Image (tube, rainbow, N blue to C red):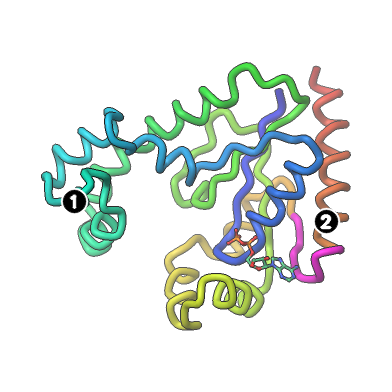
Amino acid sequence: MLIIGLTGGIGSGKTTVCNYFSALGIPVIDADVAAREVVQPGQPGLSQVIEIFGQDILTSANTLNRSKLREQIFYDESSRKKLEAILHPLIRQQMDKKLAGLKTPYAILAIPLLLESGRREGIDRILVIDADESQQIARACQRDHQSKNQIHTIIAAQCSRKDRLSAADDVIYNTGDLEQLNSQVTEMHNRYLRLAAQNS
Ligand code: ADP
């Protein structure tokens, strides 16, 4: 099966594009969903997170306090690295489990931090969703009700547009309206069906 790694900056249109691929019957496996699943109560991932950060990292309902964890690792690179060393392989396994048994010609792995995390293994092509920074900011502000500055800080911490585009095998340019976006997804879908047929 052809595996597409889909990525892009905040507000670039990843979720919208994933919804269009899903509507075409293509499975989309989301790294953010997998990342939440591996730290659910009772999962080994959560016990390992507690081993590093202590019981204080839990909410009163004994679930992971994600905003506290984000705060803790924001300024502390060594604990961020420890956390990633635990969670990345678990997230990977979780996504592989979901891939196993799928019968479609291709599948999408939606990984917002694909380029930042350096994960390439098991991915045949990198699909980047690209937009102008001003569009990213406007769309993300509207969606998340965050300030321009907050979105700008997130963009600055992510991979640059130039680096992302140079790592891409395929690009969807989300610089127009939603109709233009949808038709590019349909074109890309047909291209992936052709590529999958050539590979099989
Ligand atoms: P991401 O998942 O990359 O952060 P989203 O797909 O959630 O981005 O898009 C961010 C916001 O912008 C959403 O509210 C979405 O509906 C809207 N959006 C995305 N693409 C367009 C577009 N081409 N025109 C108008 N709004 C868009």
The residue lying furthest to the bottom in this view is 148
The residue lying furthest to the front in this view is 61
Mark 1 is on which residue type?
A: Ser
Mark 2 is on which residue type?
A: Asn
Residue 120 x/y as whole percent: 54, 36
Looking at this view, is 198 or 139 the one in front? 139
**Residue under the point 55% across and 64% down:** 10
| Local crowd size for mark 2, using a 10 Å CA cut-off: few (<14), some (14–19), many (≥20) | some
> Where, by quadrant of the figure, is residue 74 drawn?
bottom left
Q: Is residue 160 left or right of residue 61?
A: right
Question: Which of the two discs, 2 and 1, sits closer to the camera?
Answer: 1
Residue pointed to by mark 2: 182
Residue 8 x/y as whole percent: 60, 57
Q: Quadrant of ligand 1?
A: bottom right
> Where, by quadrant of the figure, is residue 5 drawn?
top right
Quadrant where the N terminus is found in the figure: top right
**Vertical comparison of 147 with 20: above or below:** below
Q: Is residue 13 left or right of residue 53?
A: right
Query: Of helix, strand and loop, which one carries label 1?
Result: loop
Residue 13 x/y as whole percent: 66, 61
Of the two numbered discs 2 and 1 on the same chain, state the one appearing first in sequence: 1
Residue pointed to by mark 1: 60
Exactly how many numbered labels are in the figure?
2
Residue 178 drawn in magenta: yes
Quadrant where the C terminus is found in the figure: top right
Residue 51 x/y as whole percent: 14, 37
**Vertical comparison of 41 with 56: above or below:** above
Residue 50 drawn in magenta: no
**Vertical comparison of 135 with 67: above or below:** below
The magenta-colored residue range is 172-179
> Where, by quadrant of the figure, is residue 182 drawn?
bottom right
Looking at this view, is 167 or 56 the one in front? 56
